[in-house]
Amino acid sequence: MRRLWRSVLFLGRDSRLRAWLKPWTDSLNTFSKGHQSLSVVLGMAVVTTVLPFIILFPPFAGFATQGDWVQGFASAGIFVLLALGLNVVVGLAGLLDLGYAAFFAIGAYSYAYGASPFAGTHFPFWPLLLVGAMVAALFGILLGAPTLRLRGDYLAIVTLGFGEIVPVVFRNADTYTNGTNGISGMYRPALPVTGTFLGLNPVPYYITVAVLVALAMVFLYRIQDSRLGRAWMAVREDELAAASMGINTVTTKLLAFAIGASTAGLAGVFYASKVTIISPDSFGFTVSFTILAMVVLGGMGNVWGVAAGAFVVYEIQSELLKQMNGFVEHLNLPPINLGVTTIDLAKVDFLQYQFLLYGLALVGMMLLRPEGLFPNRRRRAELHDVDDAEAANQELVEA
Amino acid sequence: MDVGTLTQQLVNALTLGAIYALIALGYTMVYGIIELINFAHGDVFMVGSFVSLWLLADFFGLRGPINNPAELVGVLVVAFVFSMVVMGLVGVVIERFAYRPLRNAPRLAPLITAIGVSFILQNIIQIWRGPAQLNSPQLINVQAGFRVGSAEVHWISVFVIAIAVGLIIGLHLFISRTRMGRAMRSTALDREAAQLMGVDINTTIAVTFFIGSALAGAAGVVQGLYYGYTFFTIGFQGGLKAFTAAVLGGIGNTTGAALGGFTIGFIEVFASQAGYANWSEAIVFSILILVLVFRPTGLLGQPTAERG
Amino acid sequence: MKPRPLAFVAVVALVASACGSSSSTTGPQVVKIGVELPLSGGEAPNGGPTLNGIQLAINQIQVPGYTVQLNTQDDAVNGVNNPDQGAKNIGTLVSDSQVFAVVGPFNSAVAKAEIPVSNEAGLIQCSPANTNSTLTLGDPAKALRQAHPDQIAYVRVVANDDFQGLADAIIAYKDLGKKSMYIVDDQTTYGKYLADVVQAQFTKMGGKVVKRDGAGANVSDYTSLLTAAKALSPDVVFYGGVTSTGGGVLRKQMVANGMGDLPFVGGDGISDGAASVASSFLNIAGDQGDLNTWMTTAGAHDIPDRATLAAAYQAAFGKELGAYSAAAYACTQVYLEALKAVGPDRAKVRAYVTDTTHTFNTVLGPISFDANGDINQEIISYFQFDPSTKDWKFVRQNDPTKA
């Protein structure tokens, strides 16, 4: 928590500012430690309220209108949920999952079976959220069971395999899934006051996803500090030692898969209700990888960090790089004269270089912050070599 | 299925498996030495196919089969050496800038840079040669062959299998017989101890990347010769299959990678034969999961110490 | 490193001044046509020439009193068309008040995510390329229009796949007189549906489909599929899919496996230029592979001024006319005609375009839309490879249901 406040406020290295603000950050930290759930909810409320207004200012305003940004935030929320869920599996329990999009797909298809003309059903959205989460959790356990004996990267490939198998099944079991066409025309959520959500008004979706993220965060914080959370970390660090200390590694791991998967299921239901069409192609390997990159970039194990990482990566991919052309034209920069050649940035088609820039961003961010943008202090301590162990213990004592 | 079709499919499976095996070797070598799943490796293979396309089609101006045997051998040798050396160097550069700075970072950090490198390589090729499939000259006449019973065996298949087996054996000899090979093995076992024994870790890892990427470069040449086309997205699928092959065989084990490659080739070919081509990925991964459930470290993998 | 306030201030000032510069000038009113296409990654060859067609139309055709500009959105994420991004892009276009109509999308899956949004907003969309039948017909189409079930806000200027599939079956069964078919599809919405139609029609005519395989873009080795199919001795092969997912490679490998003399039929997914065009189906298939090939396109080839259009396109972009450039040009013409008639009001433009009594004069000839938003002129063009020009040769065009 404390690190996050610092990083967000850019105070990490400015000692004067830090000293000046210390009383404030200290009291914030004390508060957040004492009332963790409340502070998460308050934090999310502040973020949710402030975000739609921050983007009215430059440089963000140059990229898109407020409506577009909020639309994008609502989609970003889906990935924040996904990253939070994957963080349980990878960050807390240390089980590398490369096929996480499978659970996302399962959640989305659960909604399709509950509320679409294809299935001929129209159950309300809210209970389906729970159903989707539970179905995904069930599949999490089903996948987890055969992998209990596997370690490290063998586990990774099995999860990757599962992530490949699921879309193939959805694609080829035509009778039940409408095959490659996917299922379209899903019913949108409805609330007593606002009525049915609209595709053009992102605000209800935005608020819904913010609430879901806040709930997921409260839940994850609670569970992280519970007996189960400590068991996950013990299993992650040394499975044998954990087992000999009386931890049931089987249930511990299965619960990690189930809880991680249920968050993805939740995200899947929300996604399906927002996009209103799902097809097997939307849940491939790239999605799993994007989520993993979000978790690692954000700082594995740190709930707020992971959420921020997901948000940043999503915005880079779907907003900044997509609207780069308009933004640069907007800037009216003079052509750059390089002697041999002149580059007029306004004429460069940035869409062409999206991949390149995204790849460079991934490599660059990783090289600059190998532990992620907002590393988890305890986790960070553990990941370093023996030389750091003492410092780590020191930090743990301090924390 | 009659005997002719069966024989034909066996040859098809061996050829497909040979290509997977070549790519899988690079995966497994890199994993063996620094425990990194190098997801950019498939894209190194892809770039290799474009480098060879450039050399053959643009530089030599070749379009189709070469009928003069001496000329054919000469061009093939140049193509393989050129593509392997270029890709080897590319591999070394990638290691130097994207992985070496993260050697002591959390284990997943280089995995993410690998994904980043993969995007970068794809985009560079896409900007260079355009985002579409390109025809690649098939220097060996793909229709020429000989008959075994009622099956038709093409020389190109024989060539692909021979190249793969030759390189696999060569690699095996290199690792088991040479000084550098011993350095690689010791670094894989215990990096610190190897360093204490006077092994230059940086050079050893760089050489590993060179060899692994060079093998992917060779696979890239084979892609052009055998399939006659290349595309900037082939690295992703090729890499995925090869990674699966490496794990199936026991990751870190070169013989296992070759075995895994051939196994996957067989599974895919016989899934197609049975009319389940659209399920082939699901079948490959289901078998992989089954194998790992019963042999958690792959077909030939050694149970590793607790670090794994 | 400390934050550098000065640099930040400079950026703010720069952006602020840029914002200020686009203020009021008298003269023609600026209106925009939204463009929603896949433009990056592997999709660029699809979206690029289509966008050029739109650009060419607004360059060539002036509407007095208006300056027409484009608001271009890309729906490819990680290089692949993405329904979520498409729906988001439509939202972006809806929120740009200057946009009065949208050309796009390109892919049917994206259309399924966009139609509900444009229907809700009453913003008209015209697709130059979607051929999937369920976008406009029957219950699936109605399910997409939940906000205003009886209001059409999506039209297309190409015939749907029911027509094209029938035409492909006619080529195989009637023109070529073949009776046993091997079908490969590329596992996409487009390819699989087209292959389904061909399979149904060919069987209905009395032919037999001896084998059907699905092989997606991830397959580069068709050898084993072909070996298995060869044993069943088909006399014609149909491919449902596009070149970039393997059409040309499949044909090339047929040659390598001694099946090059079998006739090969495909849909408009393999209509991408002469053998001299790098990466076209004919180019990838190779010198022997392009012989004995037939294909159809979902629109009229014999358009009134094809040569003029192609020359103008060549002059503007230095390239050959793309497969959907003319259709995109036609969509734009429909909109410009509506703009001239009723001005840039979205509701009026939508009503004008979907009015089934209106006929529009376009590069495709006079066109009109039916009550579902489908084009009435459901013309399929038939092509055969011509070895002397190394290009597709136009054979005939008709409405296959009436032929």
Image (cartoon, coloured by chain):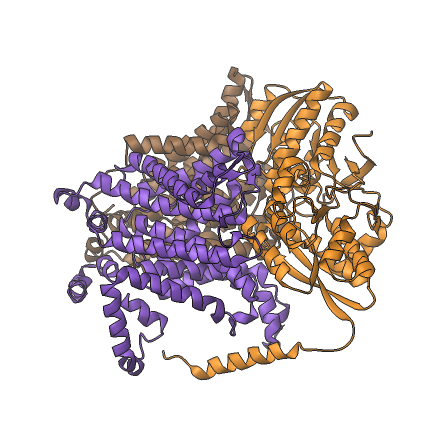
Chain colours: A purple, B brown, C orange
Instruction: Give the answer, above or below, for where B7 lies relative to A107.
Output: above
Residue projecting furthest to the front:
A193
Q: In this view, does B231 lie to the left or right of A15?
A: right
> Residue B200, position in %: x, y?
27, 58
Q: Is residue B291 left or right of residue A328?
A: left
Q: In this view of the protein, can residue C177 be seen by the observer? A: yes
> Residue A43, position in %: x, y?
35, 65
Instruction: Give the answer, above or below, for where C337 lies relative to C146.
Output: below
> Which quarter of the image is occupied by the C terminus of chain C?
top right
> Could you say which quadrant of the image residue B126 lies in?
bottom right
> Which quarter of the image is occupied by the N terminus of chain C?
bottom left
Q: Residue at x 45, y 44 (%)?
A: B239
Return the residue nearer the eye: C245 or B121.
C245
Number of marks in picture = 0
Residue projecting furthest to the right:
C304
> Residue A61, position in %: x, y?
54, 71
Q: Which residue is drawn at 81% across and 40% down?
A: C377
Residue projecting furthest to the left:
A245
> Residue B155, position in %: x, y?
54, 30
> Could you say which quadrant of the image residue C28 lies in?
bottom right
Q: Which residue is drawn at 60% across and 53% down?
A: B129
Q: Residue at x 26, y 66 (%)?
A: A32
Return the residue nearer the eye: B145 or C199.
C199
> Could you say which quadrant of the image residue A26 lies in?
bottom left
Return the residue nearer the eye: A247 or C79.
A247
Q: In this view of the protein, can residue C292 be seen by the observer? A: no
